Image (cartoon, coloured by chain):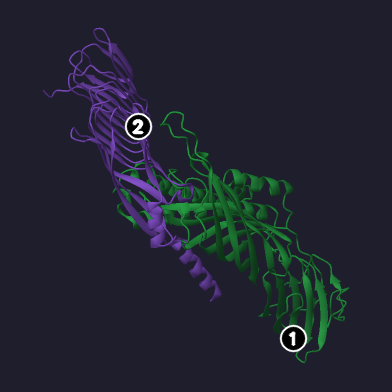
Chain colours: A purple, B green
Amino acid sequence: MLRRTVLSVLSAVSLGACVFGFRGEANVEASYPLTDVDVVRVQLGPTPLTVLGDELAPGLELRGAWRSIGGSAKLAKETALGSAIVWAVDQRFAELRAEVPFKLRGQVDFEVDEIRLPPDRDLELVTELGDVYVFAVAGNISAEVGVGHVDIDGGAGGLAVHTGDGNLHLRTSGNLDAYTGNGGAQIYQTEAGGNDIVVHARRGDVEVVLRSDANLDLRLEGREIRVHTGTVSSVTRGSFTREVGAGSVKVWVDAPAGDVSVRLDDAP
Amino acid sequence: MTTSPGTPASSPSTPPIAPPPVVVVAAPRGGLELVSTRPEGGTVSVRDSKGALVATLQLQAGGRAQLDLPPGEYMVDDAARGGRITLSVEADRRARFELTPAGARGMAGELPSPALAPTMEAPPPRRWKRVVAPVLSAVVPGLGQMINRQPGKGVGILFGTIALALGAGLLQRTSGGTDVSTRGLASGSYAGESIGAVGYGVLSGGLQMLYASQIMEAYATASGLRAPEPRTRHRVALELTRMATVGQRPGDPAAGFFADWSLSVLGQVARRFSVGAGDLSVKQGQGFTRTTLQGGLRVSYRALERSRVWLGVAAGVILQGSFGRSPTPLVPAGAQAPAGQGSFAAIPYAQLDLRFFILSRWSLNLTPRISAPLAGPRFFSGPGLGGHDDRAVARNALTLELGTGVGVYF
């Protein structure tokens, strides 16, 4: 009898070890002026980031919510209201960041629904956890992501992307430098092409679609390499190097554990 | 009646000693055989059906004696532990009373065994195995058992360890990475996240217990230890414990696995009562931006002592102080570093203490606990599953935890 009771209690607790708590939420909608600001840095903690370039946006417009936990509904609400979004400007630079008091760590997160800003601003995004989606931002863009997929269409001024774990889907007419520690990469040149493309994918395939095959400097490393442009066609393994014309357009791909494909966009 | 030489019936106060391992009796067929497989031996008293003392013997470990008695009912007392067994002795049958580590047991009506003769002792365990077997088991689970000529058990332990590690690793993998980075994917089901975290906790806790137990078992087998004698009269107990629970997270994912590793040092101040420092640990948050110092007071009472198992209750309070500093803002240029901040929490708790012994001094511990942090949040060890942020239980949040670990008794 005792043995059964003890085993029952232990089994119940083993499977029922949990925390009883409440959740709170506080919505945030804010607009920040971008007068004289060229560069915006966004660091709002572990949150997905959706950033849209909007010609009509008067400044940086933020929409999101603080999400919190607490031992009671009242405490959860207080926790959600206890942190702050800070907007700091220094000459041409501005930073949007989340500041969480020490005693609220691990109990509150800011979750971005959407950020809108004029498309000509440069953008620097930092998130530890969350997918990043950027659309129609023409300035240069950098994204530093701990874990998350990155999907960017824009960055004519240049694109630098680093994710520890996630797939890359990048469309740009600017020079591109991308890295993923675990995931594949799909890179598309847009407009006339001719921009440099440098990609490192530690564990994943890389596909590069070019708009122009003039003056290419191809340095490709991967398990299986397929190149099919108007000026170069090859199927090989390991590594492939070729210069076309002046060789001034870098297409450098390093995918030691994946396949590499470089082709010319056949769309008009 | 005949007894073995040197073991005459005597008063209970001065029991004679039967030398191990075997007392050979010039015994007729039948009678009452007294045996001890208990490591410390024990005193045995035999009384007839009227309660008159027939014999009192001190049996040592492995000792054996035989009494030739007139047919009838006899009561045999285990003086050390207080048990009594009544056996029927028949003229042409053998009755047997045995002191075992678990207690005493008796059998009657057996056919007489062949004449007792000095038995062949099992060869003593090799001393090098006492060291090598547990060390090998610590390096490769199950290898010590293979050295101990238990290949089946060794292979089973090895595959069991691999299976638990793979299962825990897979659950950890599915609870991290890009599965949790995409809003609405993993976080679409709070129940799914919770089940994943519970599964990880059960598998990793099972792995931890299997690992510790197979090292102990390798030593016990190599040393020829058949049954442990838990140190009920120990002075000090050291315990290494992982308290674990499934906690809420504020964002995505909404649930996570929370673990708290700690050390406890308890002194036994009275029979069954222990008092001491519990839940001692130092924890670091993500990127060493937080340091948490933790300690507390615990009082425990051992309510039940069975041969290999102890069951007790305990209560106490954890005191936790945390401090840290936020990173210096990049904008504006030259911004001053923020001042250091801190928090304090007192976490009262009550728990069940279940101890299972494979060795006399070492136990496997299972500890269900109920607690709630007061005055501030309770921080857990390091970044949690996925390694993305601090793991904290909010103030006043009732928490059910399960502790797994090992204890050693001095």
Amino acid type, mark 2: Ala
Q: Quadrant of the C terminus of chain B?
A: bottom right
Nearest to the observer: residue A240 or residue B242: B242
Question: On the image, numbered disc 1 is attached to which residue?
Answer: B74
Q: Is residue B305 visible?
A: no
* Residue B370 against residue B166 in the figure, above or below: below
From the top left corner, tell me how far across and down residue B117 is, in percent: 78, 67
The residue furthest top is A246
Residue B298 is drawn in which quadrant?
Answer: bottom right
From the top left corner, tell me how far across and down residue A208 is, in percent: 25, 24
* Residue A246 against residue A235 in the figure, above or below: above
Provide the chain ID for the residue under circle 1: B
The residue furthest left is A268
Badge 2 density bin: few <14, some 14–19, many ≥20, Cα 10 Å: many
Amino acid type, mark 1: Tyr
Q: Residue at x 79, y 79 (%)?
A: B67
Q: Is residue B128 left or right of residue B2?
A: left
* Residue A29 against residue B404 in the figure, above or below: above
Of badges 2 and 1, the one in the foreground is 2
Whole-number angstrom distance, CA of label 2 to CA of label 1: 96 Å
Q: Residue at x 58, y 58 (%)?
A: B318
Q: Secondary structure at mark 2?
A: strand
Q: Quadrant of the N terminus of chain B?
A: bottom right
* Residue B395 against residue B289 in the figure, above or below: below
From the top left corner, tell me how far across and down residue B33 is, in percent: 75, 76
From the top left corner, tell me how far across and down residue B384 is, in percent: 46, 47
Q: Residue at x 59, y 43 (%)?
A: B139
Residue B213 is drawn in which quadrant?
Answer: bottom right
Q: Are marks 2 and 1 on the same chain?
A: no
Q: Residue at x 24, y 10 (%)?
A: A244
Any mark on residue A94, and which?
Answer: 2
Residue B72 is drawn in which quadrant?
Answer: bottom right
